[in-house]
Image: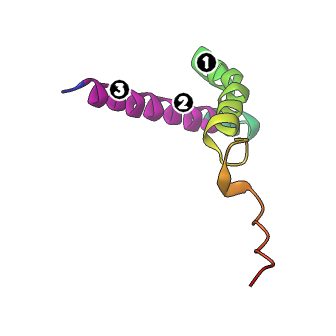
């Protein structure tokens, strides 16, 4: 395996771990909000505390709405007035 393959595998693993953390944090926050966590454990409290940071990372780096360099979010360009 080359260096590029190792980097790509590490990036894929990191993205997977991030998404698992985000989904579990949302699950814990919803359970806490609905009163299903009578006595939240340390893991649940940590996930709920990490939720704002995970949401900010998603908004800033993953979501197309938070990226200033995203060409997909720009308004359509004006057509050329010349025929």
- Distance CA(mark 1)–CA(mark 2): 16 Å
Circles 1 and 2: CB atoms closer than 8 Å? no
Nearer mark to the viewer, of 3 and 1:
3
In the image, which is nearer the foreground, mark 1 or mark 2? 2
- Give 29 or 19, whichever is nearer the viewer: 19
Distance in Å between CA atoms under marks 2 and 3: 21 Å
Sequence order check, earlier mark of 2 and 3: 3
Q: Is residue 19 magenta?
A: yes
Q: Which residue is mark 1?
A: 41
Earlier in the chain: of badge 1 and badge 2, it is 2
Where in the figure is residue 24, as x and y percent of width and height? Answer: 56, 34
Magenta segment boundaries in residue numbering:
3-27
Q: Is residue 23 left or right of residue 77?
A: left
Label 2 element class: helix
**Residue depicted at 81% across the width and 78% down the height:** 81
**What residue is disc 2 on?**
21
Q: Is residue 13 magenta?
A: yes
């Amino acid at each position: 395996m080359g260096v590029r393959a190792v980097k790509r595998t590490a990036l894929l693993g990191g993205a997977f771990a991030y998404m698992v953390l985000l989904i579990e944090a949302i699950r814990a926050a919803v359970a806490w909000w609905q009163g299903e966590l009578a006595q939240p454990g340390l893991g649940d409290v940590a996930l709920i505390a990490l939720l704002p940071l995970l949401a900010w990372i998603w908004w800033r780096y993953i979501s197309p709405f938070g990226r200033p360099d995203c060409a997909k979010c720009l308004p359509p360009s004006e057509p050329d007035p010349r025929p």
